Image: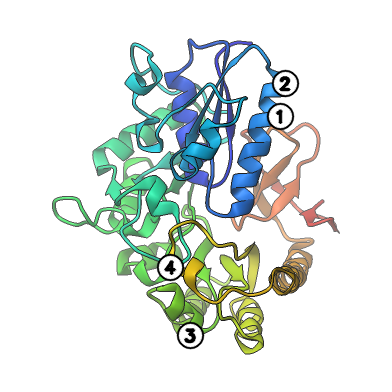
Amino acid sequence: MSGPELISLGCRLNIAESERMRGMLAGEDNLVVINSCAVTSEAVRQTRQAIRRARKARPDARLLVTGCAADIEREQLADMPEVDGLIANEAKLDPRAWNVPVEAPPLPPTRTRAFVAVQNGCDHACTFCVIPQGRGKSRSLGISDVLREVEEHLAQGAKEVVLTGVDLTSWGQELADMPRLGRLVSAILDGFPELQRLRLSSVDGIEIDEQLFELLASEQRLMPHLHLSLQHGHDLILKRMKRRHLRTDAVELVAQLKARRPEMAIGADLIAGFPTETEEHHQANLSIIRECDIVHGHIFPYSPRPGTPAARMPQLDRSVIKDRAAKLRAAVSEAREAWLQSLVGKELSVLAERDGTGYAPNFARVAVPEGIAAGQIATISPERVDEGMLV
């Protein structure tokens, strides 16, 4: 095997960081790195499962764990016999932490889309969230550094760039003149007219600045796909989560964007069974899926995380949480199926991936006909929907 094996779990930020580590550790052949996630107890379980699976597949390799779980679940992971060592999440992009001599330039990306981590950490204190413990305070990559990284990815053939961060829309708030994310997006689009597709990962809708809104509403190279860190559809639960938006903020944002750009596809994170959630609160969660037309839904059954305020609140029975999560997933699935059916017969510009599928600008997944190479953007008119994919 040439170079390290990197197994990335969790968010798009982890994917971006794994690509940088892949280049940095290019000379390390007998190495397996688990870039872990700890956002939920299920994510920690999957991390432990990935560690055991990797050790079984590579019994003689050096196995190191980094990512959020390496900090938040440090003792538990260190006790696993499969693990040779832990690398602090904050140090994982520092060559010295890995005992390698120099930081190598990024290797050609394993995906046709390039993930660029422009922000890390979080200064907010949502009552359910453990991630600030693993990521630290918010910090931003300067515009010139972002442009340099985008340029490298374009030189390696990437057709789409995805901006990622723990709290992406807080980008720039600790930099000298406190620029907003809209300025960074504009700088990328202006600096690279050859860049065909720019996409944002999860954003906090309340932090979308005026310039960013205008770009989302009108700039064709900025993909019509907005994934909101929504979390819930009821104001009381949002307050108990210590979120900074209300239900109407999200509903109005989506309505305003869709009025300007009807093809905009909405995604959202929603938590099922947050402590104190009543049936009324759950119904508000279900109804916001319909009201915002959420077609890319990430549903998280609530699980208490160590040291968070929500873990000390009155908890719901696990069976209730599981049932409510299933109903939320069913509602998203219904909305998604109707949305995909509406795209049948329409011409879509699809960026082909290496697995025989690709993504339209609105992030609809499309089966790519034979003869279209990975990295190629092709116009495809799907004929049907098959198991959540346009064919």
Q: Say the numbered circle drawn on residue 53.
A: 1
Side (left or right) of 190 relative to 11: left
N-terminal label among 4 and 2: 2
For marks 2 and 3, give the CA distance. Answer: 47 Å
Q: Nearer the viewer, mark 1 or mark 4?
A: 4
Position in image of residue 332 (x %, y %) = 70, 69
Front one among 304 and 39 = 304
Q: Check the image and report above or below for 216 versus 95.
A: below
Query: Is the N terminus in the top left, top right, bottom left or bottom right quadrant?
Result: top right
Q: Say the numbered circle drawn on residue 57.
A: 2
For marks 1 and 3, give the CA distance. Answer: 42 Å
Q: Nearer the viewer, mark 4 or mark 3?
A: 4
Say which element carries label 1.
Answer: helix
Position in image of residue 59 (x %, y %) = 68, 15
Q: Which residue is disc 3 drawn over? A: 236
Residue type, label 1:
Arg
Residue type, label 2:
Ala
Q: Are marks 1 and 2 in contact (CB under 8 Å)?
A: yes
Q: Are marks 1 and 3 in contact (CB under 8 Å)?
A: no
Q: Say the numbered circle drawn on residue 198.
A: none
Residue at x-position 37% and y-position 15%: 99
